[in-house]
Image (spheres, rainbow, N blue to C red):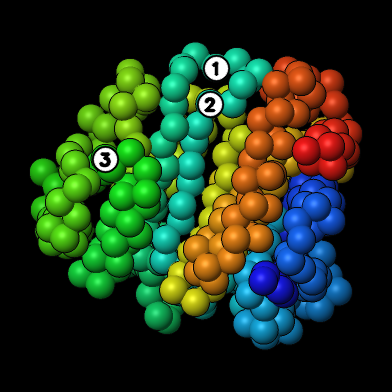
Amino acid sequence: MGDYQIAVLEGDGIGPEIVGETIKVLHAVQRKVRDLRMEFRYLPVGLKSYKTDGSTLPNETIEGLAKCDAGILGPVTTHIYDTSDPNMVNPSGTLRKYFDLYANIRPAKNYPGVSSRYEHVDLVIVRENTEGMYADRNLHFGTGEFMPDPDTVLSFRVVTRKGSERIAKVGFELARSRRKSLTLVHKMNVLRKGCGLFYDSCQKIGAAYEDVAVRDYHVDAFALHLVQRPEVFDVVVTTNMFGDILSDQAAGLVGGLGLAPGLNLGDHFMIAQATHGSAPDIAGKNMANPIAEILSAAMMLEWLGIRNHDQSAFIAASMIQAGVAKTLQQNKKTPDLGGTLTTEEFGDALVSVIESS
Ligand code: ATP
C-alpha cells in the first residue's frame, strides 16, 4: 500500500500555477486509486520565501523535505537572484546537491494531437546532475568560477568515477526496461581526461548489461543526429551541461517545453521538476502549460512504485500519463500548443478525463 508524504515547493514565475494544477490532478488520481494515500506538505521556496522568511531556501524547507518521501518543485527564476547574497541560493541546484539527486531523468516523446516536425520520438535523456560545469554546485565550498583578473575567467568542470558510474547504472537499468539501446554522449576528442573518465566509467558499468546495445557520439555530432533522426534514440546518458542543453533540444522536437517533464533522482530521495524554467513572460496569466509539471509528478509516482514495490503508485502514474494523452487527443490544449485553454481549464479537463477513466 502506498502512503506517501509529498513536499510541495511552488517556486517562482508560473510555478504556483502549474504546481497548483499538478496537486489538483494528484488529488484526482488519489480518489480513483485504492490504497494510494498522499499527504501534501507545502514548504516555502524562491522569491516569495525570500520576502517572508529571508531566504530562497530556508532551513525549514530542507528539514521538511527530509521528512517526506519525495518532493514536487516548481521552476525558480534564478537568473535574477543576487548571487552575492548567501540567502539567495539557487534552490534547484542546492537541493540536487544536498539530497544527492545525481540523476536527472528527462523524457521526450510525441503525444497524439500535438503537431511536431517528427514522429515516433520516444527517448529519455539521463543527465548527471551533481557535477560538471555548473559553478554554483560543483565544489563543496565556493563556486567553480574564478576571476584572476577582470578580463579572465576560469570555469571548473568536475567529473568523477563515482558520479559517472552511478549515472551510467541508472541509464543501463532504464535502457533494460525500455528498448535496450543506450547512447553515451561526450566530447572525448577534446576533453580527453574528463569525458574520457566519463566514457570509461560508463563502459565499465555497461559490461554487466550485455543485453543493452551501446553506441556513443561526440556531443556536436549527437546534436546533429538528434535533429535528423530522433526516433532512433532510446536512453541517452551524458554529463550535466550537455544533458541540460540536449534535453531542451529534445523537448523542441516533440512540441516544446510545456511537454517536457523531469525527475531528480537519488538513492534515497527524489524531486519532480519540469525541464522548463519559470517563464516570467507568462507568469500570472493563467496560460502556462502545466503538463510538464504534471508528468514530472507521474514520474515521481512511477519511481515511488519501483522503489516501494507499490502497484498503487504505478497505477496512478499510468492513469496520469494516459489521461494527458487522452486530453490532448481531445484537442484540449494551452496556447503554447496552439490551444485556447487556460492553465486551470487544462487541469480541469485532465481531472474529468481521469475521473471518467
Ligand atoms: P528562467 O529564467 O526561469 O529559465 P526563461 O523564460 O528564461 O525562464 P523558460 O521558462 O524555460 O526560460 O521559458 C522559455 C520560453 O518557453 C518562454 O517564452 C516561456 O514562456 C516558454 N515556456 C516555458 N515553460 C512553459 C510552459 N510550461 N508553458 C508555456 N510556455 C512555456
Residue indicated by mark 2 = 110
Mark 3 within 8 Å of ligand 1, using the beta carbon? no
Q: CA distance from mark 1 to mark 2?
A: 8 Å
Any mark on residue 155, and which? none
Callout 2 environment at 10 Å: few (<14), some (14 to 19), or many (20+)?
Answer: many
* Residue appearing at x 79%, y 24% in the figure: 332
Sequence-wise, the earlier of marks 3 and 2 is 2
Q: Is residue 118 above or below residue 11?
A: above
Choose between 227 and 325: the one closer to the eye: 325
Residue at screen point 33% across, 38% down? 179
Q: According to the image, label 3 marks what residue?
A: 181
Quadrant assignment for the N terminus:
bottom right
Q: Kindly state the secondary structure of the residue where label 1 is placed.
A: loop
Disc 1 and disc 2 in contact, CB within 8 angstroms:
yes
Q: Quadrant of residue 64?
A: bottom right
* Disc 1 target residue: 116
- Left or right placement of residue 2 versus residue 33 in this view: left
Q: Amino acid at mark 3?
A: Ser
Nearest to viewer (mark 1 / mark 2): 2
Which residue is at 31% across, 50% downward?
A: 176
Between marks 3 and 1 in the image, the one whose residue lies nearer the viewer: 3
Percent x, y for residue 27?
A: 83, 56
Kindly identify the amino acid type of the residue bearing the numbered disc 1.
Ser
Name the kind of residue labelled 2 in the image: Asn
> Residue 68 at what x, y percent from top left?
67, 78
x then y, percent, for residue 219 = 26, 38
Residue 296 vertical placement versus 61 (above, below): above
Question: In which quadrant is the C terminus drawn?
Answer: top right
